[in-house]
Image (tube, rainbow, N blue to C red):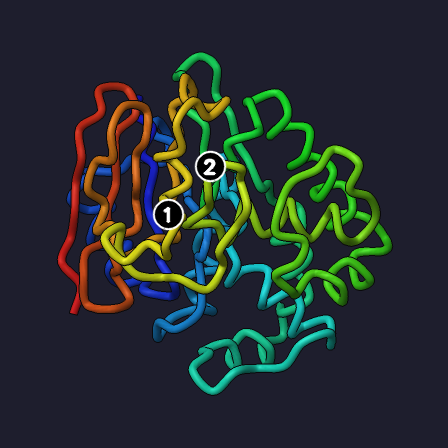
Amino acid sequence: MATYAIGDIQGCLSRLQALLNQLNFDPKQDRLWFAGDLINRGPESLQTLRFIKSLGQVATVVLGNHDLHLLAVASGTSSVKPQDTLTEILKAPDCDELCQWLRQQKLLHEDPKLGYVLVHAGFVPQWDLTKAKQCAHEVEQVLQGRDYVSFLNHMYGNLPLQWREELAGWERLRFITNCFTRIRFCDKEGRLDLTAKEGIDKAPPGYMPWFAVPKRKNQNTRILFGHWAALQGQAQGINIFPLDGGCVWGGKLLAMRLEDGKRFQIACD
């Protein structure tokens, strides 16, 4: 039995299937962790969503910003962007069923036995694992509840930029969502910059990768994440494991076997 953590697929189902063949994946024994952004920008978003849903308990999914974007568009609180590849999902007869399933997925997954935590983008330095799990649960409860459309309607935006325990309401939920699904750079006080999307060497003045903040409270947590294609899946120091190889941009689809840390990859056209 093996557990594989897999980076952003973004609708590239054929590449995922090629990677699973390389892994000799056996759904009767193995388990898959997906780091979010299952869909969008790639050519097979509908088929990807259906396939991962069909895996049932074999698959563990955390939500990415593109997954949340689909939910917002499907609920009527946002609109399709020119570069999106969501139309096939939105027109599918099982669209509602797929979105209902997606809403039940997590923002953070922890396996104490394996000793890893999975999120889509990252943590702020003020959160230890206990606080991160609490914050993730707050958003998950709302997203899975009856008032999820109101949440999606208030989800977009870059403010507030900094965590404060007294944050409340939609501002609190928006900040938590931005951390788990959009963070790349922040300053040493944890103020976010959600506009910079390039590599580490392009950090805005005074900012650094979230995982490079000195004395961050989560530095002893082994964190798997996707989202940041510019990192190309390259190791980023102790306990930091990027998984986004930029598959949809012609890079690689990456996987990591959690039992021994071995990495796998498949080239993408």
Residue 264: which disc? none
Q: Nearer the viewer, residue 259 or 166?
A: 166
Which of the two labelled residues, at mark 1 and mark 2, occupies the earlier sequence position? 2
Q: Give the secondary structure at mark 1.
A: loop
* Tag 2: amino acid: Lys
Residue 100 x/y as whole percent: 69, 56
Q: Describe residue 41's horizontal placement relative to residue 79 as left or right.
A: left
Q: Which residue lies furthest to the bottom in this view?
A: 82
- Quadrant in which residue 127 is drawn: top right
Q: Given contact means CB atoms under 8 Å apart, are the residues at marks 1 and 2 in contact?
A: no
Name the quadrant containing residue 15.
Answer: bottom left
Relative image position of residue 95 (x, y in whole percent): 63, 69
In the picture, which quadrant includes the C terminus?
A: bottom left
Q: Mark 2 points at which residue?
A: 188
Instruction: Find residue 182 and report its horizontal and vertical position in percent.
Output: 50, 54
Q: What residue type is labelled 1?
A: Gly
Label 2 secondary element: loop
Real-space Cα separation, disc 1 to disc 2, in angstroms: 22 Å
Give the residue at x 57% y 82%: 80
Name the residue that disc number 1 marks: 226
Q: Classify 10 Å Cα crowding around label 2: few (below 14), some (14-19), many (20 and above).
A: many
Q: Is residue 91 left or right of residue 139?
A: left
| Residue drawn at point x = 21 percent, y = 51 percent | 232
**53 or 65: nearer the eye?**
65
Picture coordinates of residue 137, whole percent (x, y): 69, 34
Q: Residue at point 49% right, 59% down? A: 194
Position of the N terminus by quadrant: top left
Q: In this view, does 167 lie above or below 182?
A: above
Left or right, residue 245 beside residue 6: left
Depth check: give the residue in front, 127 or 48: 127
